[in-house]
Amino acid sequence: MKVLITGGAGFIGSNLVERLLEDQRVRGVRVLDNLSTGSTENLSSFFEDERFEWMEGDIRDYETCVKACEGMDAISHQAALGSVPRSIADPLTTNAVNITGTLNVFTAAKESGVRRVVYAASSSTYGDHPALPKKEENIGRPLSPYAVTKYVNELYAGVYASLYGLELIGLRYFNIFGPRQNPKGPYAAVIPLFIKALLHNEAPVINGDGAHSRDFTFVANAVEANVRALFTDKKEAVNQVYNIACGEQTSLLELFNLLSANAGTVLTPEFGPSRTGDVVHSLADISKAGALLGYQPLVTVQEGLKRTLDWYRVNEKFLA
Ligand SMILES: NC(=O)c1ccc[n+]([C@@H]2O[C@H](COP(=O)([O-])OP(=O)(O)OC[C@H]3O[C@@H](n4cnc5c(N)ncnc54)[C@H](O)[C@@H]3O)[C@@H](O)[C@H]2O)c1
């Protein structure tokens, strides 16, 4: 199989590249990325591999997407502008990349004869639905432009599957963390921000009172879900959307305490205001991915946090 990974220079995408290049079933991996939030540094160890191909380009350009699809059997579509606050600050760009860009990728795939597209969906699609744990079929109203874009991707996937016969699988990620997640800039995620602060012996700021909770998921689990979705030959597993998480709830305060214990620090966090557009609690029911994709989290939250911290310790330049 030859696989195109859009957004492959980013956090999840580059971890997926690494995993696919270790897989004997994979004959080639091409990355399409415009380096807006990703970096070629994330791919530096793959350039020597003759099965790896780098393509700099923007998914907002349809012709670029067609070129990237040439000769590919499947796509893992990770390219997007993440972050709820970014989408609130700049909904137009988030819309252009996440909706128009995704539509370009889906359309180029169908026109180029690519059989399957696995795409990054998001737990933000649950919006204001109060039920916990989150089950795929019960979604509420979106709380941010970002959530709208991720839901629209799912709607287009459904339409492209039924109208054009493209195989589409959506993976609703729940707060993925791990090596290579960018700790810099105003839209960095909470775990790399906490790690950066702790390793610099500074007290991190917790948005809200610390009781907000998430289903934090180590990146290897999300990568494994992608591999399973790319390779499954179960008919009933295709044209579905799946929660990809650990199925464990951790509050921000618990997260801080776990990281502090691992880092060996005794800092007291500061508390700031809650962020608008964020859901308060999030926890996934992962039984559907288990039943249809055979997905099980390989790495627990505790083990994932330890591995992540160890990685940033060794790769401290990433935090500078
Ligand atoms: N990290 C999470 O917790 C999480 C949770 C839910 C969903 N997701 C989704 O997973 C995917 C990957 O997220 P990530 O955390 O690795 O983010 P990331 O920012 O590290 O990776 C995204 C990559 O897409 C690239 N990109 C952005 N706009 C592009 C464009 N117009 N053309 C080509 N490339 C472009 C970026 O340069 C970057 O390399 C995204 O679709 C994101 O919405 C992530």
Image (tube, rainbow, N blue to C red):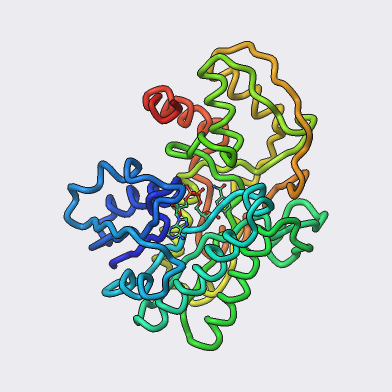
Furthest residue toward right: 130
Q: Position of residue 201 (x, y in %)?
A: 56, 14
Which residue shows up at 43% across the image and 68% down it? 232
106 relative to 285, above or below: below
Relative to residue 185, is residue 10 drawn left or right? left
Determine the image quadrant of residue 121. Answer: bottom right
Number of numbered discs visible in the structure rendering? 0
In front of the other: 236 or 308? 308
Which residue shows up at 56% across the image and 85% down it? 162
161 relative to 177, above or below: below
Q: Position of residue 249 (x, y in %)?
A: 69, 40
In front of the other: 10 or 281? 10
Which residue shows up at 33% across the image and 48% down it? 18
Q: Position of residue 195 (x, y in %)?
A: 54, 26
The N terminus, quarter of image: bottom left
Determine the image quadrant of residue 315. Answer: top left
